[in-house]
Image: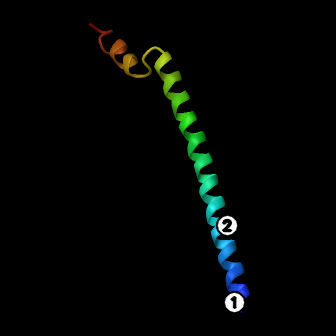
């Protein structure tokens, strides 16, 4: 009985460690994607904010 509990405890600890490692990788990938998206939006000429001002005064 004690060996089964020890085996289950080892599996839980190993599974938790593997899950935490996988979550760190997912967080790192999402951070890189967020930085790339932020950089691409910055190079796009101001994004959607300048478009609203451009068409706002066209009727004069």
Taking the spot 58% from the left edge, 41% from the top edge, the residue there is 28
| Residue 30, above or below 58 | below
Quadrant showing the N terminus: bottom right
Q: Which residue is mark 1?
A: 2
Q: Which residue is mark 2?
A: 14
| Residue 29, above or below 51 | below
Is disc 2 surrounded by few (<14), some (14 to 19) or many (20+) residues within 10 Å? Answer: few
Taking the spot 30% from the left edge, 9% from the top edge, the residue there is 59
Q: Name the outermost residue toward the bottom.
A: 1
In the depicted view, which residue is nearer to us: 35 or 24? Answer: 24
| Residue 26, above or below 47 | below
Q: CA distance from mark 2 to mark 1?
A: 18 Å
Quarter-of-image position of residue 30: top right
> How many numbered tags mark residues here?
2
Please tell me whether mark 1 sits on a helix, a strand or a loop.
helix
Q: Name the outermost residue toward the left.
A: 60
| Residue 22, above or below 5 | above
In the depicted view, which residue is nearer to us: 13 or 59? Answer: 13
């Amino acid at each position: 009985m004690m060996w089964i509990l020890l085996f289950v405890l080892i599996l839980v600890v190993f599974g938790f460690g593997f899950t935490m490692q996988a979550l760190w990788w997912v967080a790192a990938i999402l951070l890189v994607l967020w930085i790339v998206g932020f950089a691409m939006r910055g190079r796009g000429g101001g994004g959607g904010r300048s478009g609203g001002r451009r068409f706002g005064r066209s009727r004069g």
